Image (cartoon, rainbow, N blue to C red):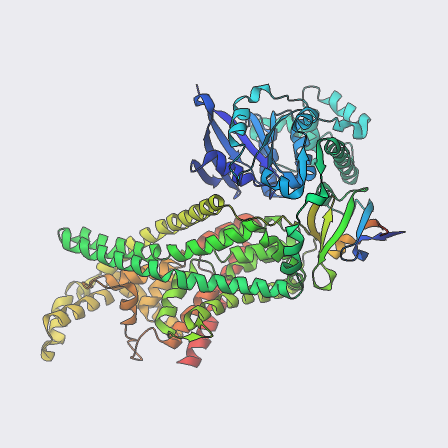
Amino acid sequence: MSQTLNTLKRGERAIIIDVSSEEIPLKLLEMGCLPGNSVELVQVAPFADPMYLNINGSHLAIRKETAIHIIIEKEII
Amino acid sequence: MSKQINIALIGNPNTGKTSVFNALTGLNQKVGNYPGITVEKKEGICKLPRGVKAHIIDLPGTYSLNASSLDENVVIELLLNKNDKDFPDVAVVVSDVENLKRNLLLFTQIKDLEIPAILVINMADRMKYKGISLDIDFLEQELKTKIAVVSTRKKEGIDNLKHLISNYKDISTAPCLNASEIDKDYFDKLRKAFPNQLLYKLWLVITQDVNFGKTDRNEIEAIASFKTKSKSDLKRLQQKETIKRYQFINNTLKKGQTIDVSQAKDLRTKFDRILTHKVWGYLIFFLILLTIFQAIYDWSTVPMDFIDGVFANLSDWVKNTLPAGAFTNLLAEGIISGLGGIVIFIPQIAFLFLFIAILEESGYMSRVVFLMDRIMRRFGLSGKSIVPLISGTACAIPAIMATRNIESWKERLITILVTPFTTCSARLPVYLIIIALVIPEGRFLGLSYQALTLMLLYLLGFGTAVVSAYILNKILKIKSKTFFVVEMPNYKLPLFKNVALTVLEKTKSFVFGAGKIILAISIILWFLASYGPGEQFNNAENIVKTEFASQNLDQEELNQKIASHKLEHSFIGIAGHAIEPVIRPLGYDWKIGIAIVSSFAAREVFVGTLATIYSVGNDDEDTIKNRMAGEVNPILGGPLFNFASGISLLLFYAFAMQCMSTLAIVKKETNSWKWPILQLVIMTAIAYITALIAFQFLK
């Protein structure tokens, strides 16, 4: 079942299914946030915002407001 | 005639590009600005085998050739402009072995420009810890390049890199993939319209919004008119292009790179668990700040006392050795005293730059950005504003330039407007001397009162910045889309060479930049203080002698009276008295008034000015501090620098906008006079009012 990235819990992994190109800056795509790539939530700041992610081997932090535009499918452990 | 090779050093941020630059050039480097803009331009000379010299430009770090900031524009402007004198013969693309996938995106773009490109895989010493092995021959073949595996930390691979650079003519200029496949029709049309141009160059010109060199402009404008697609279509194509490039990179690395996860030692996770923790993370950040301020205060005392003594002796020696006369006085009383006022602060400023460099180099700064984003957003700032606010403690000018990577214009503007409230190193001299005069020695919980006062002043500056940001956020009606992406680099032990060069460079530019202004102002002040109009000045000796004839003063006391009478009726004295009514309610006399007025050029002039004013006509060899401590308030009696006037001065300097260079930079970065003028007026008003209230309550 697909969900948005902001529902990911710490330590969970998922695969990126789709990114809404209108809302997501090109820079984030260039850093590896593309359909098919894996994503893991490394750490969250208080109130789960921003989110510290490992996307395709790149470590970066984005805000929750950006994460809701990224569709993921969680890995079943 | 020259056999010089032009090299452009390009790479993502956090790949150790600057370490490679330092390893290639050593001390043969200089930092300047690109013409017309405030982007820092780092250049250096590197000696290659067979006596060939290479000129290297360290370009600003960028993730791709799709520029989204002024700094990144510099990169593509240079790479697209063949006529630029710095246009590279060879591009050296620096990548980090742990982030090859992401780093190669930029590399494939540069290859599409058909510039010979060498790939540096840096941080090779990390391969063992991460279980990474590379098939270099395969990668060289797929990426159509030569690869230098380098470890700047272990000083390995640099000679090989130099060798590759000197043989750059052997490197293929063919692209590694065909990006035009993303929309064949469109690119075919484009090729037909401009048969003589490089396809990828055309594509960049169409999708980017950059200024190009004069020479290329006409043809480029002709191309820019070939916009047959809407903005959102173009963006979709750029996305397709990025996916295409990643496909190629993923396939290449699947064969060329193996990662044995069982071998990987993950220090990052362990550190991050504590340093970005909801409670410990903040606590550690606070402790680090506390340590920095205690260190700046305690560690610098010895060298500072030493420098103070040296300058006092030097001034004395000049007076005693050179023949008496106007020039000797100018040298001893004007120039040496004025310069002493700035040189004395080198230890503290160097320490401050040292700590900031370590925080940046170690990767810790990104964690602070992550921790603070949510909080800062409440005040209309971004987590990224923390970098300008912290580096603002060194100097507001680089801090304001560091706001460029804040994606939202509103958050960026607010950061620019409030950054000058943070305690910059130019305020430090003023704070230190006043704290030393009015805050008692003694300790509280192991921390000295004086260090605590300094810490409070830093917190005050930071607090004011944040509160003003909150107000500005409510007032300013700017709509802008907010994006926030920050890379969380791996933790690294800072390289000594990088830190040392940064500290050296920054301290040097601070001292010479400020030194020039201070020297000029010291000379002007000395003239104004040594000459005066009218009877009162020129006939001072007789006037004083008559006045005190009944008091039987000895010669020394008489000379002092004459000197101070002269100073009071000199040009500067007259000017000082003119402004005295305005500043008297703050607890200042006319001498402090002069120092405040002259420090509107730059704050650090304050101490130098007082040093110059107090040493004119004063024959004793003495330190600035002792002279200031001896000043008597002409109206209230008692020491001029007491608790009330001291606090009042501290508050005035904490809030006032007294830095012309900062105003100039704000004008440049916001492209309007409106914002710097607003800063000047509002900050000075806050300064005056708080200083007034403080003095009136405490006196």
Q: Residue at x 70, y 38 (%)?
A: B101
The relative height of residue B254 versus residue B285 in the rendered view (above or below) is above
Relative image position of residue B344 (x, y in whole percent):
34, 57
Quadrant of the snapshot with the C terminus of chain B: bottom left
Query: Residue at left 52%, top 67%?
Result: B459
Q: Residue furthest front?
A: B262
Q: Is residue B395 visible?
A: no
The residue shown at (47%, 72%) is B689
Quadrant (top left/top right/bottom left/bottom right) for the N terminus of chain B: top left
Left or right of residue B473: residue A6: right
Quadrant of the rendered image containing residue B444: bottom left
Compared with B551, B10 (above or below) is above
Seen from the viewer's position, the closer of residues B351 and B6 is B351
In this rendered view, identify the residue nearer to me: B461 or A6: A6
The picture places residue B7, in percent across and down from the top left corner, at: 53, 29
Residue B47, above or below B432: above
Relative height, residue B299 to residue B190 (above, below)? below
- Asked whether the viewer can see residue B188, the reply is yes
Q: Position of residue B6 (x, y in %)?
A: 51, 27
Q: Residue at x 71, y 19 (%)?
A: B195
